[in-house]
Amino acid sequence: MSKVRVRFAPSPTGGLHLGGVRTVLFNYLFAKQHDGEFVLRIEDTDQNRYVVGAEDYIYKCLEWCGLTPDESPLAGGPYAPYRQSERKNLYKKYAEELIANGHAYYAFDLPEELEAMREQLKAANSDSLQYDHLSRGKMKNSLSLSEDETKRFLQSGTPYVIRLKIEPDQHITFTDLIRGEVEFETNHVDDKVLLKADGMPTYHLAVVVDDYLMKITHAFRGEEWLPSAPAHILLWQYLDWQKDMPQWGHLPLILKPDGNGKLSKRDGARLGFPVFAMNWNDAKSGEVFQGFKELGFLPEAFVNMLAMLGWNDGSEQEIFTIQELVTHFSIDRVHKAGAKFDFEKAKWFNHEWLKKTDAEKLLPLVKNIFENEKIVVADDTKLSAVVRLTKERCVLLTDFIEQAGYFFVTPKAYDAAAISSKWDKTKTIFFNSLTVIFSQSAVESTAAIEEGFKKLADEQAIKVGELQMLFRVMLVGSKKGPAVFEIAHLLGVEETNNRITHCIKTLNLS
Ligand code: GLU
């Protein structure tokens, strides 16, 4: 069997939607588990839809997700170039070959003539407004014109497109790796443009030519491309490449949380969650779409969550590393039906991943988030310990600001109500004595701090529970956080004492 080669073939027209990243992931997993190659091909033949920055954004997303292609415009490879605009001159000969063997034709219609055709069909209540076997006879093309007329048009430099000639009443079937047997009738398939007037191929021609030339063996793509499959299959046949045609797998859609239709980029803003992998700035509309990355997702969690959108390994296991996914993934366990996106579940994955990721690995990420918030971290060892202590409490990386930021910033405000409900003169005496004890004796461990604290409470006959709550608010500003003696230990006795004094002063406690 020939080496497995798959491709992700995005058009650089905007940000990478999570459905797009899932397509990357399934391609990647399939390639890796078959010891094959994963190709990234940029399909930029539609210059009108080209968006500056979109290609770069794709590279960055793939890098963040750790789904690095083996061959790409950046990495190069044996079938370079991998950007279709740079392959422009390669496609024309195939379009001409199709004309020569009677499967395509020249069409000289002007935009206004195409518009008039649609208007006429509309007026005649026609089922279809397409350029197809029913309408092409009335249009200006090499099928309806005489040979001489066609020649004249071509010689005089009249702009033309090349269209695929779809014969009616053909029955096309293929076996989709996810959907099983798929059937189409050609009666409703239009005569797709293959080569445009500017000499650029359309997606339909370029995708077939490049999948062939790049020796792609399996093509996994979104379900929205299923209606294009009959035209593609015919092209493989007409170019006499059928025996090399890749096996297709059309991946189910990712649906809105209520299951009502495809999740769109607008749904994110409407429902309050990201739909793009990373922040995407739409230069045209000026809109900024927040990404999973910037919201505080770990790439491992994001990828894991995507894998489970429409796939499981048949067991109860939900948390998978990328290596485990490579081992366990199987394309025949990908569901046919669309997968509903559930943001709460996505966050659950991130929480699980934060719990299982080493503090040392999280350190640079948390540091980065702190830097953005102007939280200064002077001591990495301390931050490491803080991350270890607080990561269970964080669902998103950005939660470290609230759950761990106070280790590095003295509280500016306190839960005054919590303190005043329990404060009296005895507490002032207690906390003043506590600072003295802390500054005099060596309290170098959590246990020593706890022991000193409890011994003093005992001596002064005050309930420890009340004191602990007060102590916590003094150190943190509020009633949250892990075990208070751990907090004090990590702050160090000097800072602990400072915070006690600062709180007493700020709230004017006596
Ligand atoms: N260029 C198409 C896209 O933008 C690729 C479809 C395919 O994979 O065949 O998604």
Image (tube, rainbow, N blue to C red):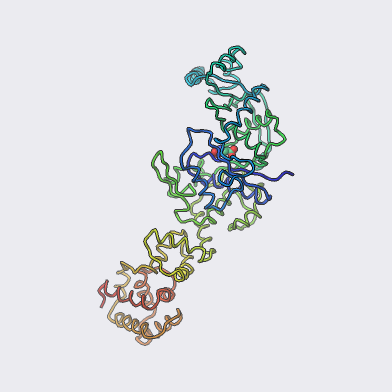
Measuring from the top left, give residue 350's x and y in whole percent: 51, 58
**Left or right for 510, reference 60:** left
Tell me where residue 194 sits by quadrant: top right
Say which quadrant the C terminus sits in: bottom left
Residue found at x 28% / y 75%: 504
**Left or right for 442, reference 16:** left
241, above or below 361, in the image = above
Q: Is residue 168 visible?
A: no
Tell me where residue 249 sits by quadrant: top right
**Left or right for 27, reference 440:** right
* Residue positioned most to the right: 1
Residue found at x 32% / y 80%: 431
Q: Is residue 331 visible?
A: yes
* Residue positioned most to the bottom: 459
Say which quadrant the N terminus sits in: top right
Measuring from the top left, give residue 488's x and y in whole percent: 40, 75
The answer to which of 334 and 104 lies nearer the viewer is 104
Residue found at x 53% / y 39%: 11
Question: Which quadrant of the render holds ligand 1?
Answer: top right
Residue found at x 63% / y 24%: 96
